[in-house]
Image (cartoon, rainbow, N blue to C red):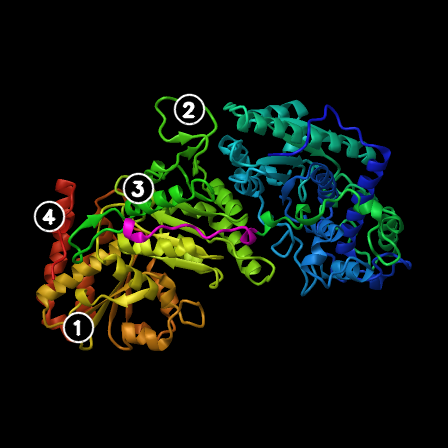
Amino acid sequence: MLKGKRQNSTVLSDQELRTLDAHWRAANYLAAGQIYLMANPLLTEPLRPEHIKPRLLGHWGTSPGLNLVHTHLNRVIKARGQDALCIWGPGHGGPSVLANSWLEGSYTATYPDITRDKAGMERLFRQFSFPGGVPSHVAPETPGSIHEGGELGYCLAHAYGAAYDNPGLLVACVIGDGEAETGPLAASWHSNKFLDPVHDGAVLPILHLNGYKIANPSVLSRLPESELDELLCGYGHEPIHVTGDNPLQVHRAMAEALDGALDRIGQFQRAAREDGMSERPHWPVIVLRTPKGWTGPAEVDGQPVEGTWRAHQVPLANVRENPEHLRQLEAWLRSYRPEELFDTDGRPREQVLACMPEGDQRLGATPHANGGLLVRELPIPSLDRSAVPVDKPGATMHEPTRVLGSLLEQIMEATQTRRDFRVVGPDETDSNRLGAVFGATGKAWQAEVLPTDLHLSRHGRVMEILSEHLCQGWLEGYLLTGRHGLFSCYEAFVHIVDSMVNQHIKWLKTSRALPWRAPVSSLNYLLTSHVWRQDHNGFSHQDPGFVDHVLNKSPEVVRVYLPPDANTLLAVADHALRSRDYVNVIVAGKQPCFDWLPLDEARVHCARGAGIWDWAGTENGGEPDVVLACAGDVPTLEVLAAAQLLRRHLPDLTVRVVNVVDIARLMPREEHPHGMSDFEYDGLFTRDKPVIFAYHGYPWLIHRLAYRRTGHANLHVRGYKERGTTTTPFDMVVSNDMDRYRLVMDVIDRVPGLAVRAAAVRQRMADTRTRHHAWIREHGTDLPEVADWTWTD
């Protein structure tokens, strides 16, 4: 619960006002210094061209506003003893967040060579946007950050994800007015309908309207205040306005706004937690209007800069070459009166530090921004409680995701009191056959509930909203602050978050190289309702390309699994949910599927990643004539059906069946940690025999992963080739030439000597495909020999 007593108004003493202004000026000075200076950090001598960086990179325009927010958050955190985290939405807010973490000492605690003195200040300045230094964004290298802000639109979703199940945490979220124009941010305002005042923390959005983006005015800044208020009230917020360009007046207004917002939040939480209030609160939002590039150069080369789009990046661009620009820069930096802010050794003076909290309550030191320090092992029960019995392959059928739902229900039960596991998805938990979880928890919901509604709960931990962006953003914020979760999504539409997963993978890759960042729980995707079973949705719902997208990314971070049945899905999910610092993509069907492996064999097979299914082939210890390989549930079915046809029609042919669960196993070991050595690969797929590979997604991915292998010339891949429609399940594989009959024809075409010897068999397979087309158009169902097929030894 937010701490502190309600104050009717905030009246800063003159001393408090001086300390806040001193801290803010110091942060502004340090932010500008990072953009420009590589020497002479305290301006102890006149500024010369050699003191200036040769390449001026960074963004000044947003920095003064961020510094103001940081300064005032320090005050309320210290006064109230409040645990807090801040999400800095403006993409290039790095100078200000770095400046403030250096002032509070958390930066030096993290990087001891960047000392809080003159030498450390010079290193702080020099490293910013400099080769071998740090990025201009609020990146993983920045203490106190879980949000890079490279791509705009996700700060508010991240803030809510951090607040869920964090009842004592205040998450402030600064939203830049450019970011406020994005679709994901617009949807994120609805996150408050899922915020439980009893079990969750609080999110305080701070909409920073400085008027401009990189070259244009921002939409929200040009709305009349009354219209903006109507918009924010409609989103379920109560706006508090802070407007001005006079620093002392703005300090007073900002202090009053923050105290008023936190008092209201505390009231809401007490009413819910102590008095049982169930009405959804209208949470406060601060609308902060200050000039872009505030306190910077008012005019450069006769053009207005402060308060315009020209202040967005580097207001004075030719400082080394232009003496007038150099003079203006020195006047600008000296306007902050650095001699009052830092002593002769470059240490911040007492007045600058007076408003700052201590220890873990510093924004740069909060453990909530280094979630691996807080994460606990997930209590995953024994898989035996969920596994399906398999006495022999292919004798029974189950819906794999429904079986997984049983495991997720048990995890929800085991985390009932600790509340550190959530399932998110775009309105599809039941559709994806995971409905068992509702036996342990409901769907988070704070809005109106009608008698016809199912599973809605004010305290639920299943998050459903028809926005993949919000699902992704919520889960990222949740994981990065030390919790666990699963994102369930239709396979075709997970592409909506392509760029978001890019950013998260980059974050994990960078953070893994930082020894001070503790590993966090992996981001786990379950992609179902997949390309091969869109019986009523059709072509629009058929796209298996997310796997291709993910496998383009950092190999030390990404993992892709295609379990072929229910027990292998359990084994893969168990591994993924226990893992750290990965993005795990699991593709599994929700329709009834044959059970191939008992649990113990499924565990071994998944640990191997790829292996020979002896029971499905006809090797008998000899060398195969052909390898039938498969990855994915439907491809596995078609390969096993093809193997059975070959056994019946070509009994002398020696067939090896290889199933691949971990798709990265196909890559060379030098390119992916899960990759096989050439020795392993050749032993599994042979060096010179035909390999007919049925793959769940686009065929060229398999070729790309295996192109350096010795036997690549013998590799023939069947998969999805963008031929889809609303049709029968088997017609989908026929349309894309991945059906069992086409696979048998491929074997005959590629095994030397079979083209003539097995011509009649090939013709029979082709005729069956022709008969299939006529049958489905007359009956609307698959051929009986397909629909009623079962595996027989």
Q: Callout 2: 10 Å neighbours few (<14), some, many (20+)?
A: few
Q: Taken as a whole, is the magenta stretch helix, strand or loop?
A: loop
Kind of residue at disc 1: Glu
Quarter of the image for the C terminus: give it.
bottom left
Residue named by callout 4: 784
Q: Secondary structure at mark 1?
A: loop
* Frontmost residue, 454 versus 148: 454
Kind of residue at disc 4: Pro
The x, y position of residue 261, in whole percent, is 66, 30
Kind of residue at disc 3: Arg
Which dot, 4 or 2, sits closer to the camera?
Answer: 2
Residue named by callout 2: 449
Kind of residue at disc 2: Val
Residue in the image at 79% along x and 47% along y: 353
Residue named by callout 3: 433
**In terms of sequence position, does the residue under pointer 2 or pointer 3 come before the other?**
3
Q: Secondary structure at mark 4?
A: helix
Please state the extent of the stretch shown in magenta in the rendering: 371-385
Q: Callout 3: 10 Å neighbours few (<14), some, many (20+)?
A: many
Residues at marks 1 and 4, CA–CA distance in whole angstroms:
30 Å
Residues at marks 1 and 2, CA–CA distance in whole angstroms:
61 Å
**In terms of sequence position, does the residue under pointer 1 or pointer 2 come before the other?**
2
Q: Pointers 1 and 4 in contact (CB under 8 A)?
A: no
Residue named by callout 1: 619
Quadrant position of residue 13: top right
* Frontmost residue, 541 versus 420: 420
Residue in the image at 35% along x and 62% along y: 662
Q: Pointers 4 and 3 in contact (CB under 8 A)?
A: no
